Image: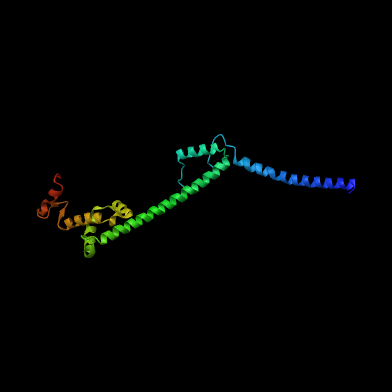
């Protein structure tokens, strides 16, 4: 190989290295740019750019802990926002799973109440229909809409002890006796005196 060819080969080899280096150099700023966007904590973290669900608000104590952790690892605002967005999604998912689990637990508890009620020796079995008719007389009389909604949502409207309570009140109402005060024997014109002894006429 003559000197001219050797020089051309070296130049070609150098040229290839230069182009390769240029290609690598072109890629380097992208990597550096990404790194710079991930790191470099701001003076103060601001999550106004994070999209939150309706009626969602941050817990100040946890937010401060998150900020300390983000600052410890020198996270940029962009990185902190991305992590915060993920944390919000996880919180939503956890809340949804919890709500579903609680709803299922409530459903199962209500089913247990119903089973106990139907099989109760005193008011269940063959006595069930009669018991419910009598209990509902008191239930509709003394439990207003709010109380009925509360008992229904909690499943307590099927709890044997709650039904027994209203059943006992219903029986007393049918016997013209309320809360242990027998007013059946009193003259009709004096019933108001018994229920409202201080009322002036």
| Figure label count | 0
Which sits in the foreground, 154 or 54? 154
Residue at image position (74%, 44%) is: 21
Q: Position of residue 150 (x, y in %)?
A: 31, 52
Return the residue found at the far front: 1
Residue at image position (11%, 52%) is: 189
Question: Residue 172's image quarter?
Answer: bottom left
Q: Does the rendering let one see residue 52?
A: no
Q: Does the rendering let one see residue 10?
A: yes
Q: Position of residue 200 (x, y in %)?
A: 14, 44
Q: Is residue 161 above or below residue 14?
A: below
Return the residue found at the far bottom: 126
Q: Is residue 93 above or below residue 37?
A: below
Left or right: residue 133 versus residue 104 is left
Left or right: residue 144 versus residue 193 is right
Left or right: residue 59 versus residue 16 is left
Q: Position of residue 82 (x, y in %)?
A: 55, 45
Q: Position of residue 154 (x, y in %)?
A: 32, 53
Q: Is residue 79 above or below residue 150?
A: above
Residue at image position (89%, 45%) is: 3
């Amino acid at each position: 190989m003559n000197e001219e060819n050797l020089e051309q080969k070296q130049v070609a080899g150098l040229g290839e290295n230069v182009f390769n280096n240029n290609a690598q150099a072109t890629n380097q700023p992208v990597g550096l740019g990404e790194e710079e966007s991930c790191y470099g904590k701001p003076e103060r973290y601001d999550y106004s750019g994070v999209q939150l669900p309706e009626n969602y608000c941050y817990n100040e104590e946890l937010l401060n802990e998150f900020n300390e952790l983000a600052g410890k690892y020198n996270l940029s605002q962009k990185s902190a926002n991305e992590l915060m967005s993920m944390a919000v999604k996880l919180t939503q998912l956890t809340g949804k799973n919890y709500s579903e689990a609680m709803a299922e637990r409530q459903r199962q508890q209500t089913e247990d109440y119903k089973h106990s009620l139907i099989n109760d020796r005193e008011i269940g079995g063959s006595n069930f229909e009669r018991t419910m008719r009598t209990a509902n007389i008191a239930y509709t009389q003394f439990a207003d809409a709010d109380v009925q909604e509360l008992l229904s949502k909690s499943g307590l409207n099927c709890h044997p002890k709650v039904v027994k309570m209203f059943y006992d009140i219903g029986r007393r109402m049918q016997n013209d006796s309320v809360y242990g005060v027998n007013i059946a024997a009193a003259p009709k014109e004096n019933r108001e005196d018994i229920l409202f002894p201080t009322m002036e006429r």
